[in-house]
Image: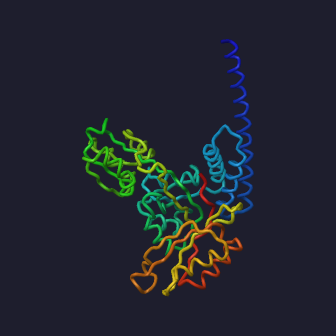
Amino acid sequence: MASTEEELGKLREGIDRIDGDVLRLLSERARLAQRVGEIKHGNIYRPEREAQVLRRITATNPGPLPEAAVRTIFREVMSACLALEQPLRIAYFGPTGTFTESAAKKHFGSAPAFTPYLTIDDVFRAVESGQADYGVVPVENSTEGSVGRTLDLLLTTPLMICGEVNLRIHQNLMSKAASLDGVKKLYSHAQSLAQCHEWLNRNLAHVARVPVASNAEAARMAAQDPEACAIAGEAAARLYELDILAANIEDDPNNTTRFIALASHDAGPSGSGQDKTSFVCSAQNKPGAVHDLLTPLKAHGVSMSRFESRPARGFGNSRWEYVFFIDIEGHRQDAKLAAALDDLRGCVGFLKELGSYPKAGN
């Protein structure tokens, strides 16, 4: 027993010593970051630089900490250092407690000032008007597809995509009720109801389902009604002090939502072929037009990761005209990708580059 206590004492002394070293090095890093801000004077948030740091750190991680933990720690370190010189203002599709808030904090860390907005339109307007430096909105879900309003606004906004976040969506059933037996009403966003459709049919087929504006709003309403429950994330359960009666009820265990970060600029090349470029274009009204707009990508060896058509909504003269949202691998400054886009402009009705940005990390 004595030898065990002696060993524990030495281990704790070692931890205390390392903690002191970590704090000293963090302070040194913060001073260097401050000096970078003094030299640059303007916008010192560089999405491509942060992506490079996170990739390098995770690639050299010796363990035993898992990659996700290392990314989270260094994300918070960079977030705190940036806030010393330039506190960021982040608008996100709210209210508080939504998955979009979680995505915003995953991308920017917890140091910025986060402001929820009740509509996607309001997030765009906040960034366009300068009320916020960056905005975060959902753009597509692996189960339910694209978020139409985000795509419509990307078509007309001067903003660009400077980053993306992939967030695994775990849906939880929560309530003030002690069990499912007393539940008579279920609140949730329509997409979450769809994502949990089979589970609900098996377990709550008799309960009325009420679609609301967001999962956070569903949690708020359930907190006011002891006979109601809600589907939402853990953050909403904590915020509204609800008990999680069933966790991870989504039908697809890999259910993931992709979010984008919006700004007045996109990102520079982050290297290592780990960038993505998004654009929207229209096809000319002639046979084989869609084939023609894909040909330049193939000719220049550019890989496409997403291709989606959507009604033009104000572009063109016909109510049946469509535009195409396309994601391709690489940065628009890359030689072969720039050449492909130049060729593409000659065979489309119009083309709008939405931005180049680092691919989302894990």
Seen at 67% across and 64% down, the residue is: 42
- Relative to residue 127, is residue 238 drawn left or right? left
Q: In this view of the protein, can residue 199 be seen by the observer?
A: yes
Q: Tell me if residue 344 comes above or below residue 258 in the rendering.
A: below
Q: Hey, which quadrant is residue 238 in on the image?
A: top left
Image coordinates for residue 147, horizontal then vertical, percent: 44, 64
Does 150 sit above or below residue 232? Answer: below
271 up-or-down from 280: above or below: above
Q: Position of residue 190 (x, y in %)?
A: 35, 57
Residue drawn at (71%, 51%) of the image = 56
Residue 143 place in picture, x, y as percent: 44, 57
Name the one closer to the observer, 81 or 273: 273
Q: Quadrant of the N terminus?
A: top right
Depth order, front residue of 233/280? 280
Residue drawn at the location 58% of the way across and 54% of the way down? 108
Q: Residue 350: which quarter of the image? A: bottom right
Percent across and percent down for residue 279 are 56, 73
Number of callouts: 0
Q: Name the image colouring.
A: rainbow
Residue placed most toward the observer, 97 or 3: 3
Q: Is residue 156 visible?
A: no
Is 267 in front, or is 289?
A: 289
178 vs 99, left or right, is: left
Give the left or right position of residue 177, taking residue 29 as reference. left
